[in-house]
Amino acid sequence: MMIPKLAAAGFLLAVFNGDAYAWNYKGHEVVGAIADELLEPNARQQVKTILGIALKVAGPWADCARSVARFEDGTFQYAPSDPKYQIPCKSFETAAETARLEDYVSRNWSNCVYQAKHGCNEAYHFTDVAIQHGEYSRSYEGTSEHDVVGAINAAIAVLKGQPAPLPFSIRDKKEALLLLTHFVGDLHQPLHVGAIYLDRSGQPVNPDLSGLDPFTETAGGNFIKDVSKDGTEAFHSEWDEIPNDVGEGANADMIRRARLVPPTTEPLGNLAVTWASDSMQISHKAFAGLTFTRDLTFTGTDHNQWLVHFPDRTAYWNSQNELKREQLAKGGARLAQLLNTIWPSPAAASPVEKGTACTTIGVCYCITAGHRDAIAANVTHIRQLIADQRAAGKAIGYLSIPLSTFGGSYMGVNREVAQQTKDRIEQRFGSGSVWVLNTGAEANLPSSATGADFMYMWTQILEGRGGFGEDFDFFYFTGPADFARFFGLTGTGDADKISAYFDQRVATDSELMSAVAARKVSKAGFRNYYALRASIAFSLGSHDEWNISHILNERRRASDQFGIGNQIAIMFDGHGVTPGNFEGAVAGGNVGRCN
């Protein structure tokens, strides 16, 4: 699906039917459903007002537009070529919505240089950067002003009340939101960003070095067939399929994954490029270990066709299915970030109003007044998660871990350590018997929330309705060994290993790149933190959580209902803490009244 700087050879119509979609319709529904869950109040209301439908329903719209055909008399008609293409489009088959689809395609048919007999709107779904590159750049072959990056930025402009830049024709905010919901999903399907170009012998070539030969184009993997399936299924189509366990909406696992995606700290206009560069890195993994041969049975004359060969096909797709889950989660999280940024909630727009808020056990914080509703909603949501696990007969644990890019630490690493530690604790005790609340995955406050806002929320959850921490059986405080396991440290050359890890990650992690550029973290700071200080001992929030555990156990010891024998167990770095330690308080972190 190459978009060269000049029009290249024409493609077969089959390239642009349903088999060329980024994700199948279920994937776009998943991306939309995740975003539905992560929208802040103002963005949620804007979506409701503009669309009148959920983002999950809106997700497939731009693919429904591909069923609009142009007839010889110049008219356009919504005419799906196969009933399966209608499945996600039922909401758009009213007279008014069908007219919208036809109008959109007619306005975006011949407004750019693109393939003969195909509308420009089809080019908005992808870009084709050679996988030899590690980032997206408009200087590369395969990009254009009307690729998926340009399409996302055009939709953002309209949602901000600005005209769509040429060559895009976007009628109104509804059309822009329908397109944005879809194109953000497209951007996270790696074969819609990174492309492999193959010579006649099946060897990868870089058109930015050798010059573009149209016969090296693989059309996003549509000209590559899976020899394991008798050479009949396009490699692209296999990548469009989502894992069966994901379903068609936002299940608990996908929401958890999405909440682990750190927000991108870039200006709104840079987000599409940054995320395209991230997908470029993922495309490297999609093609890693594969070999290709030219399909000698193919008789077409306008392009070549190849066969893909896997060293271990089952192992490949097992690993790629996990990659698909992560990309779908990123798509949903980032769509929500875009919309929350375009339409910030009033509380986020004026976070300066502060007020003192105290909890049942008398712990007070200076919180953002406008975030009270969001905090209350999260408390209710998380208490329900705990109740569901308690109803399943499980012991409940609370995981305390530093969760910020601060003092040399990096939020992305800390979130991953949190998930790894949760998984290890549950494996240790048995996932049928223990459930750990991962604070890195279950918090969903506005981006402007402060440490005090988060701690006011967590304190309410920790103390429970009665003020005895009755929802929890143990607290787990992360320590040096938990972080050492993540980095694979052995006690020899540990700081050197962390430095090497930083070099590797900063080359592929756009969020870390941004943090380094903003001087929030440096290589030396990263090395020193994770080699010498990585634990709750250097976290403001964890200091508060330690003191809360101390207060709760003090209250239990003094209560006839609980007593010493029913104190909350405290673990640090994988080991139980002695009474002499957990009965003592530490310096406060975010706690304190407003001045």
Image (cartoon, helix red, strand yellow):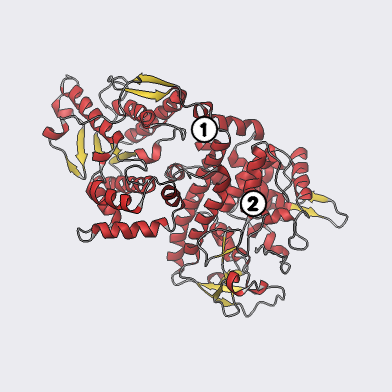
Figure quadrant of the C terminus? top left
Dot 2 or dot 1: first in sequence order is 1
Which label is found at residue 150? 2
227 or 489, nearer to the observer:
489
Q: Position of residue 95 (x, y in %)?
A: 78, 39
- Residue located 54% across and 45% down the image: 31
Figure quadrant of the N terminus? bottom right
Placement of 115 over or under 23, stated as above or below: below
Q: Are marks 2 and 1 in contact (CB under 8 Å)?
A: no
Q: Position of residue 564 (x, y in %)?
A: 14, 27
Local SS, label 1 = loop
Q: Position of residue 256 (x, y in %)?
A: 42, 43
Q: Which residue is mark 1?
A: 40
User: Do we see residue 209 in this rendering?
Assistant: yes
Placement of 490 over or under 299, stated as above or below: above
Identity, as a three-letter code, of the amino acid under mark 2 = Gly
Badge nearest the viewer, 2 or 1: 2
Within 10 angstroms of label 1, few (less than 14), some, or many (20 or more) residues?
many
143 or 220, nearer to the observer:
143
Within 10 angstroms of label 2, few (less than 14), some, or many (20 or more) residues?
many
Q: Residue farthest to the left?
A: 580
Q: CA distance from mark 2 to mark 1?
A: 26 Å
Which label is found at residue 412? none
